[in-house]
Image (cartoon, grey):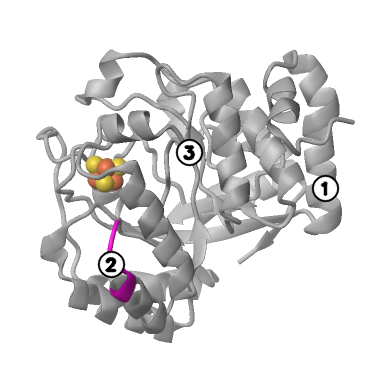
Amino acid sequence: MIKPYDKEDILQILQMPDEEFRGTVMAEAKRIHREQNDNTLRAVAMLGFDNICKNQCLYCGMRAGNNTIQRYRIDSATVVKSAQAAYRLGFRRIFLISGEDPKYGFDNLLTMTEQVKKVGFWISMACGEFSLDQYRALHEAGVDEYVLKFETSNPQTFDRLKPNTTFAKRMKCIEWVRESGMQLASGNIVDYPGQTLEEQAEDILLMKKLQISWAPVIPYLPAKNTPLAQEGGRGSLEKNLKEIAILRIMMPGINITAQQPGENSAQGLADEEGNLNALEAGANMLFADMLPDTLAKNFSVVDNRITLGLEHIQKMAGLSGMKIEY
Ligand code: SF4
């Protein structure tokens, strides 16, 4: 059995024929999750509370230059009410996510965090780049884990895809998240236009080096009215599954996003086959949207982000034979 410990091992798996991969590495990743993590499917409530963003990331449907989506900003009192509803449904983990919207106000963010914490949640948050002091304040207010993706370990590509920041700054912010005491969730975009297998292998090694708690990875999905959509289509589902399996084998205890696309692009991340394949490859985490559908569909980093509820998670747990953990 190949153990993906170094770049050569990882490249060997990324180049493996699909059938061989499924019978060996993918089966091994699933076995590890079953034996070491009790085969649990982690259910998380998700609240995209603000889709306004000052940045122009080349791949993102919420980039400032995209005038074709309806923008919204939900006040902290409404977020807390939604969090209470999620708690009543049984959720104990919540993921609070927004674009980089300076007008939301950092104090508002802290107030919201404190109140959501009081509801009883373990909190993951993704609101972009801040200073070390701000990360510390978020941690003190109740954020347990902060999501700051590096997207690619190639500094030149990062600087091109994210023109409002730099790779150096992103890595500094990632260091600050760790220093603040929060757990770090981070990862890459799999198979964006032009990505090489060598780069994907380097991305995987960087996740290991950063000792991430959650790998929020998905294949590249072209979003309408974005510059990167002109450069190529959807990333490979197979490369994505391979990455999930490698991550599970390398870091058995982390969370890995199972909300993954399948062959039917119209189903977006809600594709049952895509979700089930990811669970079979060792992924373990699914999200339920806590916003009304009309707003949630505009939280659109990628296209066709069909909103999902608890029923979807329960169905996936039933079909995969996994136990839901809230
Ligand atoms: S990826 Fe994040 S920072 Fe970049 S445009 Fe989209 S919401 Fe803004």
In contact (CB < 8 Å): disc 1 and disc 3: no
Q: Which residues are magenta?
A: 129-133
Residue 272, picture quadrant:
top right
Which of the two marks, 1 or 3, is nearer to us in this view?
3
Residue 275 falls within the magenta-colored stretch:
no
Of mark 1 and mark 3, the one earlier in the sequence is 1
The crowd level at tag 3 (other Cα within 10 Å; few <14, some 14-19, many 20+) is: many
- Provide the residue designation for mark 3: 188
Residue 48 screen position, x and y as percent: 31, 56
- Provide the residue designation for mark 1: 32
- Provide the residue designation for mark 2: 131
Quadrant of the rendered image holding ligand 1: top left
In contact (CB < 8 Å): disc 2 and disc 3: no
Which of the two marks, 1 or 2, is nearer to us in this view?
2
Seen in the image, is 279 located left or right of residue 214? Answer: right
The reply to whether residue 181 is in sight is yes
Q: Amino acid at mark 3?
A: Asn
Q: Residue at x 16, y 38 (%)?
A: 69
The crowd level at tag 1 (other Cα within 10 Å; few <14, some 14-19, many 20+) is: many
Residue 90 screen position, x and y as percent: 55, 71
Could you tell me which quadrant the C terminus lies in? bottom right
**Considering the numbered disc 2 on the image, is that residue within a helix, a strand or a loop?**
loop
Q: CA distance from mark 1 to mark 2?
A: 37 Å
Which of the two marks, 2 or 3, is nearer to us in this view?
2
Q: Residue at x 34, y 30 (%)?
A: 156
